[in-house]
């Protein structure tokens, strides 16, 4: 980047969102390994989900880390979450029409004392399936925003019908308040937030 040249804009949604080079499982495992519950927040029973926002550059490097939404009174949680994300390596960059773009990603990192005590643990197979389902739902939501911005009503109706069928099928595998639902929510919630913001900003 030359002297005085402005940074290129950062996009929220692109046709192909960034993916972690080492794969989803390695991504979440690295986060889990790096997240250690801070003693102060543990002693004060402070729990919640920290949303870390960063930019995946055109070369796949993550930059510009910041807390999108933290936990009230839990500065230690914010610090642990952002440091965990800073430890991430390269991503495959997001692309639009095959051209790499600068793209925002938001990562939810949940801090739960119940989880920390280790009651119900999901198997690796469960986690892999849940992440696959969450990615599918997020992908459809991203495509809906792109179609809405393009004014493609036919595409919008097709995607909504596809999402309805998927959600109906998922309902059988995700009972209310189960660990599976909570894990899926962690993946889908930031997508919902970003999709809502994009829709409102239309």
Image (cartoon, rainbow, N blue to C red):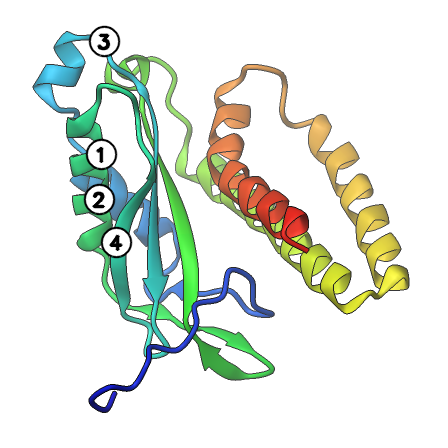
* Observer-nearest of 201 and 196: 201
The reply to whether callout 2 and callout 3 are in contact (CB within 8 Å) is: no
Q: How many marks?
A: 4
As measured in the structure, the alpha-carbon distance from the residue carrying label 2 to the one carrying label 3 is 20 Å
Q: Quadrant of the C terminus?
A: bottom right
Residue 78 - label? 1
Q: Secondary structure at mark 2?
A: helix
Among numbered discs 2 and 3, the one appearing first in the sequence: 3
User: Residue under circle 2?
Assistant: 82
Q: Quadrant of the N terminus?
A: bottom left
Left or right: where does residue 9 sit relative to residue 39? right
* Observer-nearest of 194 and 21: 194
Question: Relative to residue 64, is residue 3 depicted above or below?
Answer: below
Residue 187 - label? none
As measured in the structure, the alpha-carbon distance from the residue carrying label 1 to the one carrying label 2 is 6 Å
Q: Secondary structure at mark 4?
A: strand
State the image coordinates of residue 199 (x, y, percent, origin top left). Answer: 67, 49
As measured in the structure, the alpha-carbon distance from the residue carrying label 4 to the one carrying label 2 is 7 Å
The reply to whether callout 1 and callout 2 are in contact (CB within 8 Å) is: yes
Among numbered discs 4 and 3, the one appearing first in the sequence: 3
Among numbered discs 4 and 1, the one appearing first in the sequence: 4
Residue 102: quarter of image: bottom left
Residue at figure coordinates x 55%, y 14% from the top left: 177
User: Residue under circle 3?
Assistant: 45
The reply to whether callout 3 and callout 1 are in contact (CB within 8 Å) is: no
User: Residue under circle 4?
Assistant: 65
Q: Secondary structure at mark 1?
A: helix
Q: Secondary structure at mark 3?
A: loop
The reply to whether callout 4 and callout 2 are in contact (CB within 8 Å) is: yes
As measured in the structure, the alpha-carbon distance from the residue carrying label 4 to the one carrying label 1 is 11 Å
């Amino acid at each position: 980047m030359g002297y005085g040249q402005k940074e290129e804009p950062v996009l929220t949604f692109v046709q192909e969102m960034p993916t972690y080079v080492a794969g989803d499982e390695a991504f979440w495992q690295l986060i889990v390994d790096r997240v250690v519950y801070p003693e102060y927040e543990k002693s004060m029973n402070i729990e919640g989900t920290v949303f870390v926002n960063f930019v995946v550059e055109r070369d796949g490097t993550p930059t510009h880390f910041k807390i999108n939404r933290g936990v009230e009174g839990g500065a230690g949680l914010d610090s642990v979450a952002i440091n965990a994300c800073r430890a991430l390596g390269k991503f495959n960059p997001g692309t639009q029409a095959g051209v790499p773009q600068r793209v925002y990603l938001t990562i939810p990192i949940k801090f739960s004392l119940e989880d920390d005590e280790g009651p119900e643990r999901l198997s690796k197979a469960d986690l892999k399936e849940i992440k696959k389902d969450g990615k599918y739902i997020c992908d459809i939501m991203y495509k809906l925003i792109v179609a809405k911005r393009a004014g493609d009503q036919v595409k919008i109706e097709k995607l909504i019908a596809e999402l309805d069928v998927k959600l109906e099928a998922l309902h059988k595998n995700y009972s209310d308040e189960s660990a599976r639902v909570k894990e899926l929510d962690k993946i889908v919630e930031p997508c919902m937030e970003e999709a809502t913001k994009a829709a409102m900003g239309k």
